[in-house]
Image (spheres, helix red, strand yellow):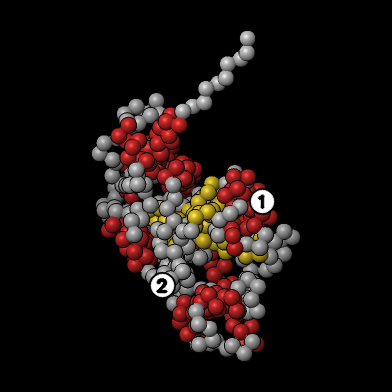
Amino acid sequence: MGSKKRAKPSRGKKKARTCTDQALALDYVRAWAHPAPPPEPSMPDAGDGFLPPQAARMACSVGGNVLFELHCHSNHSDGFMSPSALVERAHRNGVKVLALTDHDTMAGIPEAMSAAHKFGMRIIPGVEISALHSPREIPGVGDPVHILAYYGMCGPSRFDELDSMLLNIRDRRYLRAKNMLSKLNTLKVPIKWEHVTKIAGEGVAPGRLHIARALVEAGYVDNVREAFNKYLGNDGPAYATGSEPFIETVVQMISRTGGISALAHPWSLKHPVAVIRSLKSAGLDAMEVYRSDGKVDGFSELAEQYGLLKLGGSDFHGKGTKDESDVGAVKLAITTLSSFLKMARPIWCSAMKDILLRFVEEPSTANLGKMIKFGQLANFDGFAPIDSAMDVVNLCLSSWLSYDEMEAVDLEEVRSKLAQSLPAM
């Protein structure tokens, strides 16, 4: 007697399962993205993994999504808009969660967080770190690579270590910019240093985009794109490399300070496979695959091959050109966002615990200021109203975590050690 053929699952059942997965992901992302817990939990029984039909239909509808922007820049690096203006624009575009990822600085995060509070948005403290891929690890020699770092509401643990790396990169960028101006002068295209630094703004390390804008204003080119194509691109006659850290060092730093690492715009790399292979070995978590014009051929497959989470963002700078993607233009699937948060939240939680425990070692107003660097604590006005270490902990946690997170995160070890070490302040 012949064996019976296994019946294939019907399309209806497959679609129902897909809708259920989307609904579960939507519920998870919404619970994190919105500070207040949802009034009606959509999971009456967390054990069976299914949702009511109405909730599943909602997740499969057009409105069943939460818009994240995971790559954008302000005028604290090479963007044109202040963090406040950027957040307001993102809000108008429907963005609920925004990662500010300025080049090699996190200086704009506090302003972004303050602005986001007015609109009920969440800010993911981020940074886009300049690095070099150099197989032989020769300083100053190699292909330029940008790596995104995403941190929790409390920011990086061991921030001083990360900040030292970022400061060194910014200092070296001044030398790199001067080298590019020297090359432009040799090409009979003189640009004054004062012109570039004025465009960059006070305290902002100048980059190629600032020099490109100076070239436009001086009349040497018609637009920024032409400046890069003619002079400043990676193979351009005025291009100069900096002395950025190697990509492995950057990824390991992000991991050590409680962040999620992602390779930015891999389609711009000369040797993407070699770079991705090296980054994966160093501990890379994700890579950009999605753009406003969809996925880029080949990179989705590379992400799958190396086990990397697929992300994406607009890389918005606010240049005002027709070809620039607007902030919030890349709409990531709700299942992608759920996977991102499920990867990130335990890491961010560990960083938060590390920050609190390190505060125990040297409690002071100054160190508390460092601890809350990326956002003011709710109802906090110095140490005056704080009677004990537990008050410090509770104020920090209430500012960093939602109600649901406060209930879910295991913080007994933190509370116990803080109570023992700091009985009163």
Quarter occupied by residue 249: bottom right
- The answer to whether the residue labelled 1 contacts the one labelled 2, judged by CB atoms less than 8 Å apart, is no
Q: What's under tag 1, amino acid-wise?
A: Arg
Question: Which residue occupies the foreground of this view, 95 or 116?
Answer: 95
Q: Residues within 10 Å of mark 1 (few under 14, many from 20)?
A: few
Residue shown at the point (46%, 69%) measured from the top left:
323
Residue 390's x, y, as percent? 34, 43
Is residue 336 in view? yes
Identify the secondary structure beneath mark 2.
Answer: loop
Residue 247's x, y, as percent? 63, 58
For marks 1 and 2, give the CA distance.
36 Å
Q: Is residue 125 above or below residue 184?
A: above
Residue shown at the point (61%, 87%) measured from the top left:
185
Residue shown at the point (33%, 56%) measured from the top left:
94
Q: Is residue 380 above or below residue 57?
A: below
Question: Which residue occupies the foreground of this view, 419 or 291?
Answer: 291
Residue shown at the point (50%, 51%) measured from the top left:
311
Question: Which residue occupies the foreground of this view, 406 or 212?
Answer: 212
Identify the secondary structure beneath mark 1.
Answer: helix
Q: Which residue is mark 2?
A: 320
- Label located before the other in sequence (1 or 2): 1
Residue found farthest to the top: 1
Is residue 111 in view? no
Q: Nearer the viewer, mark 1 or mark 2?
A: 2
Q: Which residue is mark 1?
A: 277
Residue 309's x, y, as percent? 54, 46
Q: What's under tag 2, amino acid-wise?
A: Gly
Quarter occupied by residue 124: bottom left
